[in-house]
Image (cartoon, rainbow, N blue to C red):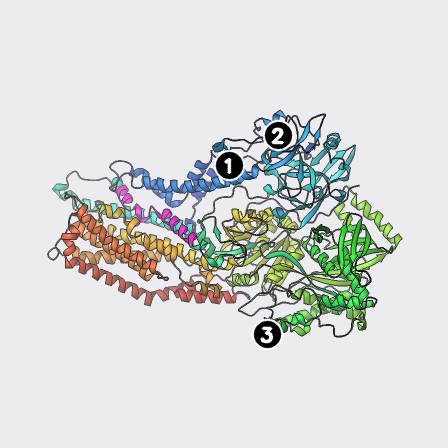
Amino acid sequence: MEKSFTVEDGRPCNDDTCESRNGQWSKSIRKRTWNALIEPKWIQRVKSWAETSVSGLFLQKPLPPSKDGRHIPLKTIHHKPLIDERSGHSYISNSIRSSRYTIYDFLPKQLFFQFTRLANFYFLCVGIPQTIPGVSTTGNYTTILPLLFFVLLTVLKEGYDDFRRHRMDKVENRKLTTVLKHSRHDRWDLSQDSVSSRPFFPSLTSLISGKKPADVTVEEVEMDGADDLQWTSTAWHRVRVGDILKLQRDDPIPADIVLLYADGEDGVAYVETMALDGETNLKPKQAPSTLNSCDTIGGLKNCNAKFVLEDPNPNLYTFEGRFYRDQDCVPLTLDEVVLRGSTLRNTNFVIGLVINTGEECKIRMNANHHPKAKKPHLERYANQIVLTLVVYVVLLSIGLSMGYLMWRSSTEKKSWYLFNATVSFGHIFVGFAIMFNNVIPLALYVSLEIVKIGQMIMLNLDVEIYDETSDTPMRSNTNTILENLGQIGYIFSDKTGTLTQNIMKFRAISFAGTAWWHGLDSECPGPVEEHNEETHVAEIDSREMPGDGEELSSEMHASSKPRALPSKANDNPWLQHSTTTELIDAIRQNPTSEFCRKAREVILGLALCHACLPETKDNTVDFQGSSPDEIALVRAASELGYLLVHRSSRLITVVEQSVYSPEDRMSYDLLDVIDFSSKRKRMSIVVRCPDGRIWLICKGADSVILPRLEKSALAGRIAVEVQRDADNEKEDLRASGQFSHRPSASYPRAIQCAVEDLNIPEDKALFRTSFEHVRDFATEGLRVLLFAQKYLSQDEYFAWKKVYLDATTSLTNRQELIEEAGELIEQSLEYTGATAIEDKLQDGVVDTIDKLRRANIRIWMLTGDKRETAINIAHSTGLFLPHSVLQIIDVVKGPLEEQLLAALESLNTGYHSVIVVDGHTLSTIESDPALKTEFYSLVSSTDSVICCRASPAQKASIVKNMRARASIGLTLAIGDGANDIAMIQAAHVGIGISGKEGLQASRVADYSIAQFRFLSRLLLVHGRWNYVRTSKFILFTFWKEMFFYMMQALYQRKNGYSGTSLYEEWSLTVLNTLFTSLCVIVMGIFEQDLSAGALLEKPGLYAYGQNNRGLYMSKYLAWMFAATVEGILVWFLCWAAYGNSDSLVRDNGLFALGHLVFTLGIVWTNLKLFGLETHHKTLVVLISFTITVGGWWAWSALLSGAYDQERSPYAVRGGFIQTFGRDPVWWATLVLVLVALVVLEAVYKVLVGPVVEWVEARFGGNIRINRRSGRKKAAMEAEAGERVMG
């Protein structure tokens, strides 16, 4: 018969298309009319058509489901490839592709992507007609050639980035594994891959290298003389469905396989699944016992079996299948399947049958395939600006063309020297459109790329984000979306390896009315954090408590922040209480007392009730298991005198280090194990003691242990009273506005009397004291487990054993039957005690989360761990506040509609709200469109959300849905494992942590850091700086172009709207390159509007980017109005003082006037941006200003000497050096106009600016911070920041 392992709940679902509309409960957001300009409907239709066409050309359609799953025979040799019933071709190859492009679609996709950028499309439309001879007055190729050059640079950069991804794929696909093959190999296997087996298009690197690795027999581990079968080393991409693999210890799994044989005891193998679910603990997998002959090639050849398996799907937590052998049908579950992405541990070798390959493996089906290139959020506002400027250029060209028509009627027709010089309206319109096309600067994206490269270098060089312990600096994998770091509103975080170190420490034990702390000699329990501000702690969560005999609805969980411990050890209240060291001494001094008997019974329960395996290395025993909690308990038992030395499927051996015998070896027959599941929330083990008694030990959450006690009614009533006391204490603290720890006197006090004088309390006192201990443990952020037991009679056990055996061998509803059988025996238990385990947080996590919350960022935790674990960590990290209202959404509890409605009502209480949902419930929600809309509308308004037992695909789906519904700010996903890659790629910004789970996430993410604590500086400091820098760069770039070309437009009235340029050609050509580039580039790289210390001290200032206060349409229009006013002022003052004073000036030509206006434009632009708008004035700013302005005078002298003496409207030769350059009127006009501009700027900043800022803040709706309790401080800090910025 097959041994069954419990499959935990949590069915993931396929990715759904994100719905873009907000639900009925979403917060109302002020709509801006200009948002409609971002992407008109006709552009959306064109994009939709193009994407559909591209998908039809380059992507394969999904296959229909098979009738009865995929049928895979167990054969040592396949002379022909197995056929996939769904496609009619062979199964796909084991190659994977994470790159975005192939050699065929790279150029079309890139051209489409580049010219969907609005500015590029605009210049393409302008550049094409400019090449027509006679149309342009500024040259034929001055637009199209630079445009193609800039686009080519961007395309080459994207190509290089994708080439690196291809190289990573190549490394993955060419890893080696051991496959059973014929010594001559099968012809079909060595031939070219079939069409259905190959990737749809070859990769870039495969075409470049032209190499194809062949199979190599590196070691003939075993051969069969009849058929010459041998184990052959083969590249991963050559593995096929139906192949038989032999994997050694520590080998990665190359494809999804079914275990045929494992050399562990009873066919058990252990695998590490951190790349799948982020858990570092080992998980047992068991080969079917009916296939135990498959340990040799001969056994495999003689095994006539056929496997019928489910179609490939992304569900990581369930598997359905069966196999037939000798007319017997045996069910297959996830316990017999090992998935790609796992690693074989603690097992010498296994043999498996390949069932899924390549992109059909579960880990690949959970991946975010070929994610779209991320765009900066500010680009949408830049597109708005470009659209308005396009409209402006068109209207300006029409207006000037109309001016020409009027001038033609009034002047041209009456001027004999202009006979037959008439120009058509269309011709003159195109000429003006080309003249003013640089109002939208051609080099905008290239200059922005330079700015972002500088920002990336500044970010990577920040030593405050460098981790000395691991010698890991900050690394930016992209510079495209740096400003997005300053606009984050939602953070989606993994748990293991991201928030925690995944290091479990046993901290305390409670039994017989006493509590004993463990490990206090070296460390204090609870994550120790230093805080500048007051720290808070919560009591037991406020829930509905059951009446007598009812099941508790929730566990007594930890609070948000752990207590900041005193600096001096002598003042530490923890050290004033009893420790397990004293307990051990007491047991050895008086081992026969009733109290010591209870103590030994509890500690022995820790050593027996688990699924861990001992492992001896260098005479040191360590433990491996599927749960780090269990490992911590077993290690604690060994430290307390009961060392586990052997565990098999039938026997557990423990060495007791007692006063009588230093090494008293005791063996317990292992009769049954009823595994933990998320539904059961408990684990039980049945053993036969050395004295013959049958002992049931059960451990689990308090909500499931207490109702199963023999005196459950009394226990339930006492639990309610303890809970009520905690609630009253919390309300008192809430009313007083203080959320501090209870005084240390309320903790279990040290034992002041001799152990032999200790008496076991009566049941009522025992329950009250024990539940208070549990509350104290939970208050410190520790994970609490309750233990219970009972001794069974022989008749009682064997009667139950028959029911349990039938359940474990059932082919249908096996899990439900096992749970029902467990429910029968787990009744009338005796309460024995409770344990407390600490999951150590990473350094600085609590303080970081506090700062991020004060920055109005909502933090979600998405994890594959169990609900209890996730809730405990949420308490410890501070995701839960003392006054938080917790709502658990669980499909098992009842109708989801009612639960969502109740959760909505809880939001109206005004307290900090937290919602907990599991993967199975989420799958049900996403299958119903109405529920899905209600759920995401609800959680959009929730302060924190905890999603447990979530698959990678579900994590990505959550991020995608919230990305479409985010009410404020952008989304950021952070994780450290391969299972986090999908959500990292789905978010606006992806952060990878280079941690214990490898570098997969950090390599794929947009940015990589070593610790979660660096996230606060990355967002609050660098994120805000880069947002401000980029916003100013875009805004000031368009401002200076509008300012320069305003004088050009006004001059057209003086030349009969002929299109003659006010500015000299070469000066205009190098304007944006030499004389107005540094003023925006330096600001874009080095600007710091506020210091790093101020931004970290007042996290609410981060709202500046969340609310998009740096760049929005009304602000842009205000700056364009300022540019217009300044341009008008410069033109008319110059015309009045110099252009219209023929008798006073030495040179009244066009070049002298134009050079004066041009000089004013350059000097004022640099003076304004470097001197008036830059907050962080450094030596770099001073040098840049000197180089730019000084360079302009050098350029003027160069032009004066370099130009030839020729007939031209521009008398350049000798002009600056000999004529107007020596004219005091010219210089006086220059100084006069500069003074006027400075006065105008000062008047605006002193009188008008504060009024505008106040009106925007008061009526503009830009500050959208929720002012509910818990975020008022962020709102006040944001408003203070607005005043500072003003």
Span shown in magenta: 428-457
Front one among 468 and 200: 468
- 285 relative to 96 in the view: left or right: right
Q: Which residue is mark 2?
A: 90
Q: Secondary structure at mark 3?
A: helix
Residue 736: image tag? 3
State the image coordinates of residue 753 (x, y, percent, origin top left). Answer: 77, 74
User: Toward which corner of the image does residue 1190 lie, by quadrant?
Assistant: bottom left
Real-space Cα separation, disc 2 to disc 3, in angstroms: 71 Å
Quarter the N terminus occupies:
top right
Real-space Cα separation, disc 1 to disc 3, in angstroms: 61 Å
State the image coordinates of residue 717 (x, y, percent, origin top left). Answer: 76, 67
**Residue 839 visible in this rendered orientation of the protein:** yes
Q: Indicate whether 294 appears above or below 959.
A: above
Residue 55: image tag? 1
State the image coordinates of residue 168 (x, y, percent, origin top left). Answer: 52, 41
User: Toward which corner of the image does residue 1036 lie, by quadrant?
Assistant: bottom left
Q: First in sequence: mark 1 or mark 3?
A: 1
